[in-house]
Amino acid sequence: MTLQSAIIIGASRGLGLGLARALAEHGASVTATARGDAPDLAAAAAASAGRMTLATVDIDDDASIAALVAAVAGKSFDLVFVNAGAFGPRHSSPTAVTPAEFAALLWTNALAPIRVAEALLPSLADNGTLAFMSSRLGSVSLNTEGGYDLYRASKAALNTLTRSLAVRLKGRPVSLLTLHPGWVRTDMGGPNATLSVEESVAGLVKVLDANRTPGHRFVQYDGQELAW
Ligand SMILES: NC(=O)c1ccc[n+]([C@@H]2O[C@H](COP(=O)([O-])OP(=O)(O)OC[C@H]3O[C@@H](n4cnc5c(N)ncnc54)[C@H](OP(=O)(O)O)[C@@H]3O)[C@@H](O)[C@H]2O)c1
């Protein structure tokens, strides 16, 4: 693996924790963030032979983002990976959701990832990778079966914001990746999902390694490019 330093935003559990673990196992120096108590992440850091260090951020909170930026000042990352996300109300109904619930979901899944990423851009090395954990469900053109309306809308908004970010980054040597991890057995994906965290993360690490040239791509865990 060519990535040597990474920051993973949202690594307390699930895919973020799996990614932080896998990158550290591949020898990268990893800064892994949580927003609160994260015993599994603390255990992973303790077992990482010093390759994983911990930091704190709640991406919904600009003051918390500013504190993270101050905490990592002077560090340079080959990879900034914004993984944090939420599913929103399980009913996923546009008629049942409250304005506050929908606003919170859009904030966490679409705006906050962009805000934390932009704040960390000065810490992204030249020829570095900026990755966002989106979902195939965020593809507008692949949405032929419906369902999960609110979550889909939030990830479609994230995808659109990453495309606008790609335009702002034009001319900078950055690989911008909008990623789909597959359907994964986490608290969000549930027990019936097709992939384990380890399977998804092993694929994502290969995708990160194979896509280090500048440009913007929407790619899933097995390397297949997805339609927007
Ligand atoms: N699992 C799947 O099948 C699947 C499929 C497609 C896409 N995804 C995406 O993959 C990413 C990870 O999902 P997962 O399955 O690992 O879900 P998960 O187990 O529910 O973990 C979500 C992670 O996001 C963090 N997070 C949520 N809101 C945050 C905030 N405001 N600030 C900082 N961290 C926050 C959580 O931290 P706390 O522990 O503090 O809550 C947790 O670490 C998400 O973006 C999700 O949408 C997952």
Image (cartoon, grey):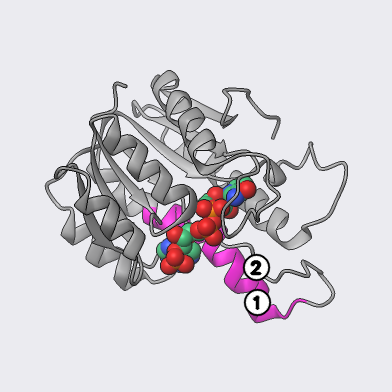
How far is the residue under mark 2 from the one under mark 1?
Answer: 7 Å
Q: In percent of the image, x 63 and y 62: which residue is there?
A: 87
Compared across the picture, whether 92 is left or right of 52 comes to right
Q: Amino acid at mark 1?
A: Glu
Q: Which residues are magenta?
A: 97-116
Q: Position of residue 78 (x, y in %)?
A: 27, 33
Which residue in the structure is indicated by mark 1?
A: 101
Q: Amino acid at mark 2?
A: Gly
Above or below 47: residue 181: above
Q: Please rate how many residues cluster around mark 1, counting C-alpha atoms within 10 Å: few if below 14, some from 14 to 19, many from 20.
A: some
Compared across the picture, whether 41 is left or right of 70 comes to right
In the image, residue 87 lies in the stretch drawn in magenta? no
Above or below 1: residue 71: below
Which residue in the structure is indicated by mark 2?
A: 88
In what quadrant of the picture does the C terminus appear?
Answer: top right
Mark 2 within 8 Å of ligand 1, using the beta carbon? no
Compared across the picture, whether 5 is left or right of 198 comes to left
Q: Tag 1, which secondary structure? A: helix
Q: Position of residue 79 (x, y in %)?
A: 32, 36
Q: In percent of the image, x 34 and y 72: which residue is there?
A: 36
User: Residue 194: which quarter of the image?
Assistant: top right
Q: Tag 2, which secondary structure? A: loop
Q: Decide: marks 2, 1 in contact (CB < 8 A)?
A: yes
Q: In percent of the image, x 34 and y 29: which residue is there?
A: 172
Note whether residue 151 is visible. yes
Q: Please rate how many residues cluster around mark 2, counting C-alpha atoms within 10 Å: few if below 14, some from 14 to 19, many from 20.
A: many
Question: Which SS does the magenta portion mostly show?
Answer: helix
Nearer the viewer's eye, disc 2 or disc 1? 2
Q: Nearer the viewer, residue 93 or 1?
A: 1
